[in-house]
Image (cartoon, helix red, strand yellow):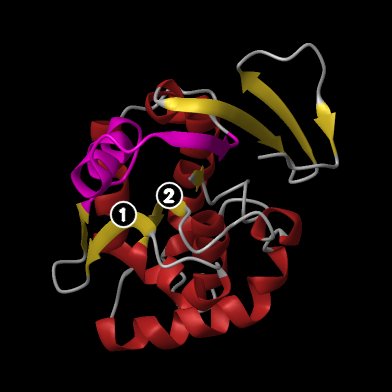
Amino acid sequence: MKVFDFDNTIYRGESSIDLAVYMIRNNKKIILYLPMIFTNLVKYKLCMVGRKEMEIILNDFCQAVMGDKDEVPEIIDRFWQIHAHKLNRKILKRIGPEDIIITAGPDILINGIRDRLHTDHIICSEVDLDGRRFAYLNFKENKLKRYRELYGDQPIDAFYTDSYNDRALMEISNRVFLVKKGVTIKQIKPVKKRNLRRGFPG
C-alpha cells in the first residue's frame, strides 16, 4: 500500500493558497490576510509552525472570509475548473484504488476533485461550515493519529511527500520519497546514494 501527500505532491503547488487567492474575487477581505497566509506558508515549509498555531490562524481566517455556506460548492467547482490542470499526472498514475491520500487540505476543497484521484481512501482536514471553523486539522502528528484510527497498524510500503512536516508518517513507512516540483524525487528511506529523476518507483 502506498500513501501520498496532496499539496506539492499530487497537486503542483499549495491548493489552499491557490483557493484563497482565487476567492479574493468574491471577498476583498482576503487581501488583508494574504501577508499572513504567505508568511505562514514559508514557516510551514521550514517546519517552524506547530499544529496549535496553525489551527488558530486557519480558524481566524475562516471566521473572517467564509460567507454563505451554500455558496461554497459553487466556488469550489469553479476553482477546480481553472486549477485541475495542476494535478500531477505522473503521480496520479502511481495511485491505485487501495492506496491512500492524506492531506492537511480541507475536505470541502479536496472533495471537489475526488473523482480524479483514483482512490476513495482520502484523509483530509474537516471543516465545519456552520461554525466557519476547522473541526479537525489533519496536520503534522494528527495525520498519523487519523491514519491509525482508520487503518490501525497496517504498514505503509511507500510514502510520497514534499515536506518533513510529515515526519510522523515517514517513520512508519518502509520507503519514503521526497517529491520536488512533481518531477524529481529522492528516496530518503532507506537512504539511497543517488536521486531518482523523472521516474516514480514503488
Residue at 82% x, 17% y: name it. 194
Image coords of residue 60 (percent x, y): 26, 52
| Horizontal side of residue 156 vs 143, given as left or right | right
Residue at 81% x, 23% y: name it. 195
Question: Going from the N terminus, do you reach mark 1 or mark 2 first?
Answer: 2
Q: How dense is the environment of label 2, judged by Cα within 10 Å: few (below 14), some, or many (20 and up)?
A: many
Question: Is residue 143 shown in magenta?
Answer: yes
Residue at 39% x, 59% y: name it. 122
The amino acid type of the residue labelled 1 equals Ser
Label 2 SS: strand
Label drawn at residue 103? 2
Image coords of residue 59 (percent x, y): 25, 52
Which image quarter holds the C terminus? top right
Residue 11 visible in the displayed image? yes
- Verify CB contact (< 8 Å) between mark 1 and mark 2: yes
Residue 39 visible in the displayed image? no
Label drawn at residue 40? none
Image coords of residue 16 (percent x, y): 49, 57
The magenta-colored residue range is: 136-162
Q: Quadrant of residue 126?
A: bottom left
Image coords of residue 15 (percent x, y): 55, 58
Residue at 81% x, 42% y: name it. 199
From this view, report whether residue 174 is shown above or below residue 105. above
Question: Is residue 98 shown in magenta?
Answer: no
Label 1 SS: strand
Closer to us: 51 or 40: 51
Q: Quadrant of residue 106?
A: bottom left
Look at mark 1 in the image and give the residue it sits on. Answer: 125
| Horizontal side of residue 83 vs 53, given as left or right | right
Disc 1/disc 2 C-alpha distance (Å): 7 Å
The amino acid type of the residue labelled 2 equals Thr
